[in-house]
Image (cartoon, helix red, strand yellow):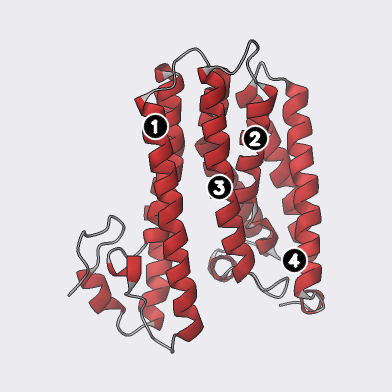
Amino acid sequence: MTSTQNSWTRQRSFLLIIALYAVASTGMLLIASAIGTEHPVKGLISGFAASVAFLYLASQIVQNGSTFDAWWSVIPPVCAIWLFFVLDDAGGFTDGDLRRLAVAVCATLWGLRLTANWAIGWTGMGHEDWRYQMLYETVPMPRWAVSLTSVHLFPLLVVTLGSIPMAIVASHSGRSFGILDILAVVVALTGVTIQQFADLDLRRFNRTKKSGDVLNTGLWSRSRHPNYLGEMMWWWSLWLFTLAAHPASWWAGVGALAMTVMFFAASIPMAEKRSAERRPGWEAYRAVTPMVLPRLRKNP
């Protein structure tokens, strides 16, 4: 922790975050708009990249990669709302409008919940995500390079791939709102609900836990990573919306697939390694609790 980070109060830290994301979101929208609604996928990709470039530079100035944490949950909903309004169909409220509205509403609920959960846990500029600290210490590159590649560019890649379905949905409005759309809404809202209850359980646990305790109640008694399950469900719901709007764009499921691979290949192994090192009862918990897909009954 640097002396600069120590000088930031929690209030000043969040004022900085609000200012940074106001600029990043505005820049993203301006660039996407300049490219034009005829090319929403190009606009999304370019806007996302510009917002990450700006936030990376800001993170290097303040020397805290966690200034980027909220990007994951702020920029996609802003883009979904923009796509709904700028591509509003002429001639009344159509099925295409309804589908875009469903995506925008689901994205907004997901983003608000995830951003609020991050904000509750982030104590300010004196705190940086433990995963970033681990990367700084273990990856044989300068801190700025680790931050660029692992903290900023890698999330840019997977979140952009995961968000492309929003632009595809926005640019294809000819199909009726049907069963796949309803399924997508159900999957999205179920994922958000699972995340919310999992995070509430985790927050209560963190308030009362003792050193070495294992969270094995609530949703965590049925799955070791219910929060990641909910997150993956959200990204797969976007693919379902894509199939409903334009089945030929099935390939856009690569984004949800990339998210799933990221969780199983990186996020979950890192979290489990840390828990095994810090919690003596972890192996016993691991032996009776599924990794992601929950068991229907609680552990005995």
Which of the two labelled residues, at mark 2 and mark 3, occupies the earlier sequence position?
2
Q: Do callouts 1 and 2 mark residues in contact (Cβ within 8 Å)?
A: no
Residue type at the position of mark 3 = Leu
Q: Can residue 257 be spotted in the picture?
A: no
Q: Do callouts 2 and 3 mark residues in contact (Cβ within 8 Å)?
A: no
Q: Quadrant of residue 65?
A: bottom right
Judging by the rendered image, the residue that carries numbered circle 3 is 109
Measured from the top left, where is residue 154 in percent x and y? 56, 48
Closer mark to the observer between disc 1 and disc 2: 1
The residues bearing labels 4 and 2 have C-alpha atoms spaced at a distance of: 31 Å
Closer mark to the observer between disc 4 and disc 1: 1
The residues bearing labels 1 and 2 have C-alpha atoms spaced at a distance of: 19 Å
The one of 113 and 91 positioned closer to us in this rendering: 91
As drawn, 113 above or below 238: below
Which of the two labelled residues, at mark 4 and mark 1, occupies the earlier sequence position?
4
Judging by the rendered image, the residue that carries numbered circle 1 is 182
Judging by the rendered image, the residue that carries numbered circle 4 is 63
Which of the two labelled residues, at mark 4 and mark 2, occupies the earlier sequence position?
4
Circle 2 SS class: helix
Residue type at the position of mark 4 = Gln
Closer mark to the observer between disc 3 and disc 4: 3
Residue type at the position of mark 2 = Ile
Judging by the rendered image, the residue that carries numbered circle 2 is 81
